[in-house]
Image (cartoon, grey):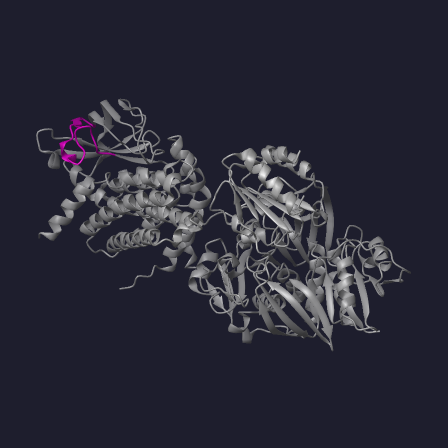
Amino acid sequence: MSVNAWIVVGDQPSISNLITVARSLGPEGGTVAAVVAGPRAVAETVAASGVDRVVWCGAGAPEGSPAEASAAAVADVIAADPPLAALSGRNPGDRVLLGAAAAKLGAVVLTGARSVSASGGTTKVLNAVYGDISEETVEVSGPVALLLDGGSVPAASGDAVPVEEVTGTPYGLKVIETVMSEFEQVDLNAAMRVVGVGRGLRAQEDLALIETLAGALKAEIACSRPVAEGLNWMGKDRYIGSSGARISPQLYLAIGISGQLQHMVGVVGAETIVAINSDPNAAVFSQSDYGLVGDLYELVGEITNALQ
Amino acid sequence: MDFELSDEQELVRSTVREFAEAELAPVAGEVDHDHRFPEEVVPKMAGMNLMGMPYPEEYGGAATDYLSYMIALEEVSRGCATTATIMTAHTTLGTFPIYKFGSDALKHKYMYDMASGRRLGAFALTEPGAGTDAAAGSCTAILKGDHYVLNGSKIFITNAPYAEIYIVFAKTDPDADGTHGMSAFVVERGTAGFSVGEREHKMGIRGSSTPPLYFTNCSVPAENLIGHEGMGFKIAMSTLDGGRIGIGAQALGIAQSALDAAVAYAKERVQFGKPIAANQAIQWMLADMSTEIDAARLLVYRAASNMDHGRPYSTEGAMAKLFASETASRVAGKAIQIHGGYGYTESYPVERHYRDAKITEIYEGTSEVQRMVIARAALR
Amino acid sequence: MKIVVAYKWTSDPEEATVGSDGHVDWSRARPGISTYDPVAIELARRLATENGAELIGVTVGGKGVGVPLATKAVLARGLDRVVVVEDDSLTHAGQAELAAAVAAAVRHIGDVDLVITGDSSVDVAAKMVPTVLAGELGWPALAEVTDVGGQPGALRVGRAVPGGAQVLEVSGPAVLAASADATTPHVPGMKDLLAAGKKPVEHVDLASLEVAPRRAVMTLTGRARPARKVRKQQILDTSDPAAAAAELVKALRAVGAL
């Protein structure tokens, strides 16, 4: 069986969307295969997810190796059965593995695919570019590497396929220390309502005000880049933007956020956007459905009251 | 005639702009509101070699050309006019007299610390009775063996008491007229008999510290005399000649900041269903403001370029300062007008630009003095 | 000991304009060092100083990425020298092509112990060039790097992982992609700017490099401006904050957002 698509998996088996896209590349008779570089347990989850073939490269990696150590093995596996497309999710480890495969295959890399289809050995992709300000339709003949939102961990479906083991030569990478974040992890994509916070918030203690609002709204809290990275007030998984999360909730409240392109590209899919900012000149207002010009310290409290 | 800046000059602009936007603009409002001297900013400027730009590297300077120094001053001023005052008063007024006229011993003692920004300088010429008529000063410096004894007072001295090094002008020959009887001295803070009074509360550049100085039998070593006795007036005028271009650059920064604010506001402020930027009245105001600032910029840069190329810059500098300072006041006033009622409040920066602009028409030679210089050249 | 920093000279899409046909006009955008590359340069500079290593900048792209203004701007940030590959064919190159060109430049320099890059560029934000670059060089790669210490060949690398952070030992040459918040880059001083013009710049012809060819061929067949939701842009009167809040909640309930 020729392989149509290889799904590249690191430490996390969140690949439901990748399987859907891989399947859509057709035709019947083409295989959707997965190559896993993380722990064996991940390979086993993937083996039960409905893919046609699973290869596990982690066997040769010594204790304490990260998934990236098996990148060369992953690339070799894929190159041995070259596909129409190699796909991975956006986690840093997955990107490294996909990059190794793309180099080995001489593939074209696309990271903004909105839709993908294939016919007669050519892959057609609608690809968003430059912070999503434009969309290009491209046709690729030859291998293409696609970086996509991975999706969620797929539920077990039908019979699991056997896990093939491959031992490669791992790179000299060894994890010697792991520190877990004090921040609780969140899946923003699953939230119906999201409250985003920007630099308009003066102090970390003021997050309490936002938390009360989010509670009343039953919303998740997110932020712009400076709040997650520069100020480190929240985990990086709460950062919305061109190199962060892209979400499409029913409601997005942008509080103290100026409306820069690099942030707003993360919420263009929101049904309704509300902005609160003290600067009437802020770019966010032209990108919102409802805007309130004023002091967030006053308005957030009033909105919380109005909701209760 | 090449109107393009060199790569280095472009980089000076973009780098200092980056610094000003990150470090100066965020505190400019508070510095103004609280009349606060931004002490924390001075070492940061020194770290970027911004406190002695035109001086040779052997003296701790960055050895840039004068035009680069003007561009840096303009960008600093665009972030915070107070900081620009501190920078020019130190770099030109406080340091140039020693650099140009001081003995090797004096240069060796002070230049490195000043050009590297480690010690802040100040220029003490103005007295209660001697402003534009600088030669009418009544401070005296009487030679007594191996030291001079200074008596008198000075007023509106920028950077005091934060400065450690003061260029003080006093009459060594009280009988001669001021243009020949005045001398210049280096006086260090902490010298017995030298005290600093209460800071003035000013209309603008409020973070700049400008108190009076008092000399009561203040003893200054004879080797701290700059040049020779009687050279004081010449030293002062020579220093102010170059300094006035710097005030032009400061005015440019204020004007540009005001224009940028007015453009942003005009695009966003909606009245009668459209942004006010769509109205011809506003457009014409912005057109005039842009043109005047550009003209002022060309005058300032030309004067600085003349200095760099060994061409005369006295009249050109006077024109630059005169036009740039009056432009800054006009532009800031129009910027408030474009903002309407909001422009009159502290929520917007334009009222600060308006208050900051005014001093550029006054200090380091009033507009009237500049007109005298220009008229003299015109009537030759 | 040689450390390479791969950087990009490009423009911010915030300054570009997009036509209704999706064509992106960059003419009004001012090019500069990609926003977060100075973070990578800063990390690399510190490591190079600690190890007495040579710090070499590498950039590839279309005409213009190697003009004196560009090379001086990046040299002012602490590089010892810069290698530039400028070619028209690279103007619209994809991530894999760019990575292959950078890899060829690294091989041309020879005996490179480490390559440090930014995680993503301001214009494309694809986050793939460093990883494909590593694949081209046959080296391991780590992304979201926040910290690098030790010596090339025996490095200690800190990096962010979902839910936390790790420290890894890296033996042998590697590609490290620095996270945007790894450190705050210093602003170059006036002396750094003036010294930049005196440092060496090497322009290398793309044709003289052995760049691994792509086996895939991509053809552009269409372009469009993405259909954006038309936003109401309704500004509520906030002179009475309580009334404004009530009005907002009422409006949100009416559109079913609550």
On the image, the x and y values in percent for residue A60 come to: 82, 59
On the image, the x and y values in percent for residue C1 come to: 58, 57
Residue A146 figure quarter: bottom right
Q: How many numbered circles are shown? A: 0
Q: Quick check: can you spot residue B39? A: no
| Residue found at the far bottom of this picture | A120
Q: Which of C219 and A13 lies nearest the eye of the viewer?
A: C219
A209 vs A74, left or right, is left
Q: Is residue B274 above or below residue B44?
A: below
| Residue found at the far right of this picture | A159
Q: Quick check: can you spot residue A164? A: yes
Q: Is residue B142 magenta?
A: yes
A141 vs B248, left or right, is right
Residue A215 figure quarter: top right
Q: Residue at x 43, y 47 (%)?
A: B269
B267 vs A119, left or right, is left
Q: Residue at x 57, y 73 (%)?
A: C209
B284 vs C226, left or right, is left
Q: Is residue B189 above or below residue A230?
A: above
Q: Is residue A211 magenta?
A: no
Residue A67 figure quarter: bottom right
Q: Is residue B263 above or below residue B106?
A: below
On the image, the x and y values in percent for residue A20 come to: 77, 62
Q: Quadrant of the N terminus of chain A?
A: bottom right
Q: Residue at x 55, y 69 (%)?
A: C92
Q: Which of C206 and B128 lies nearest the eye of the viewer?
A: B128
Q: Quadrant of the C terminus of chain A?
A: top right
On the image, the x and y values in percent for residue C100 come to: 62, 68
Which residues, given as a range, are shown in magenta?
A: B124-147
